[in-house]
Image: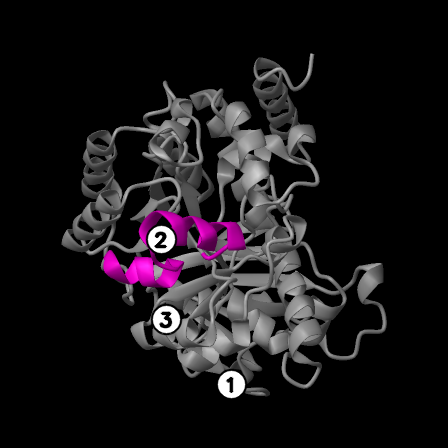
Amino acid sequence: MRTWIREPLAILDREAAGGLVIEGERIVERVPIGARPSAPVDAEFDARAHVVLPGLVNTHHHFYQTLTRACPPALDKPLFPWLEALYPVWAGLRPEHLAVAARVALVELLRSGCTTVADHHYLFPAGLDEAIDIEVDAVRALGMRAVLTRGSMSLSQEDGGLPPRSVVQREDAILTDSERLLARYHEAGEGAMLQIALAPCSPFSVSGELMRESAALARRHGARLHTHLAETEDETDYCLAHFGHRPVDYLETLGWLADDVWVAHGIHFDDAEIARLGAAGVGVTHCPSSNMVLASGRCRVLALESAGTPVSLGVDGSASNDASNLMIETRQAFLLQRLHEGAARVGHRDALRWATEGGARCLGRPDLGRLTPGAQADLALFRLDELGFAGAGDPLAALVLCGAHAADRVMIAGQWRLIDGEVPGLDVEALVAAQREASAALLTAAGVIA
């Protein structure tokens, strides 16, 4: 089946001004402006009212946190006190809660134009041993592309870590489950729909030995590695006090300074550390909304990119954002970086690159995030007929500057997964009701609400 996405209003790739030809799961041709495809097509989609982007790639999220948005005990706190307020709430997470939370997060992302998502799930209280399996089911039900990271926490407060005993696991159990998930779900190579990565949560919640063992295990399976790094100055102080190293130095001692690693936040790096990260090819996920909500600081995106680091965007958890909308996050990144770097140094195309190609690079997926022949047919199409776009001169710039927030159409692997802004067959009202019920149950069990 060959389909021509015909004559878009605007498109991110200048060489495809006349549209794209999709065959099966791939893009096979870029059509120049005023031209027709080089070979006959079976169908045409009139895109004259649409701005076409590669599907957005979200490289850092915590699905379960959609249950604790604007949670009263965590309001107006920086990261460490914020975590300490929420860990007792999250300790009550049950399988049925996570199933709803994951579906909500994924639907929000899909409706914002996101086609590929990396979720970092590191919370495994009693009874939630199959958390990643639950997320697999949610991803497959929506036909989305995902890298699900098997996170972990093994150091409780009694061991010198930050989380309470109720949410950590034994390291042998973590590694056993990690191997199970890699063997069962991890797909390798071009076109993979579901991949597994290993993601010890952070330097203050796992041991160095678990970091090393996780790296060895992931590399045996050809999988990637992920963790939080350099999010706050508190983390730097912790690493110096406990390991005698700053976070980047500590990462290097563990064998994690490599191009199969991407880290979340990456705020508190000095110039020398940025150069080392770039030379090693370590990717960084910029999470602007979360970093601003928690007042953690600002990721130095341009310096990282100049050093050779792939930079992507992440919505982070919906308890520190508090949304799962990657198009809104793209605008946030644009505004924050422009504020600090200057109007002449950061443009709308930079932000769109971070949201697409940058995400694909962090995940080691050259088949995603681009509109070139051979790439996967993952597309996000936006209309500009809302009041907020009236009078906009440059359609691509309007997506970022005028605050696009909802895609009209989304294609994943050549299949339409969002049509007229809605997921086919999804009862949104029922999903909202289920989310409210799950959130209320979690907060009631923790004593947050009566």
Above or below, 255 against 35 in this view is: above
The circle drawn on residue 15 is 1
Residue at 70%, 61% in the rendered image: 404
Q: Nearer the viewer, mark 2 or mark 1?
A: 2
Q: CA distance from mark 2 to mark 1?
A: 34 Å
Residue at 40%, 43% in the rendered image: 204
Looking at the rendered structure, the kind of residue marked 2 is His
| Location of residue 331 in the rendering, given as x and y in whole percent from the top left corner | 67, 64
Would you say 191 lies left or right of 8 here? left
| Location of residue 169 in the rendering, given as x and y in whole percent from the top left corner | 31, 28
User: Magenta residues?
Assistant: 230-254
Q: Quadrant of the C terminus?
A: top right
Residue at 55%, 24% in the rendered image: 89
Q: Hey, which residue is sitting farthest left in the picture?
A: 220
Mark 2 / mark 3, whichever is N-terminal:
2
Looking at the rendered structure, the kind of residue marked 3 is Leu
Q: CA distance from mark 1 to mark 3?
A: 33 Å
The circle drawn on residue 277 is 3
The number of numbered badges drawn on the structure is 3
What secondary structure is marked by label 2?
Answer: strand
Above or below, 318 against 336 in this view is: above
The one of 416 and 342 positioned closer to us in this rendering: 342
| Location of residue 350 in the rendering, given as x and y in whole percent from the top left corner | 58, 76
Mark 1 / mark 3, whichever is N-terminal:
1
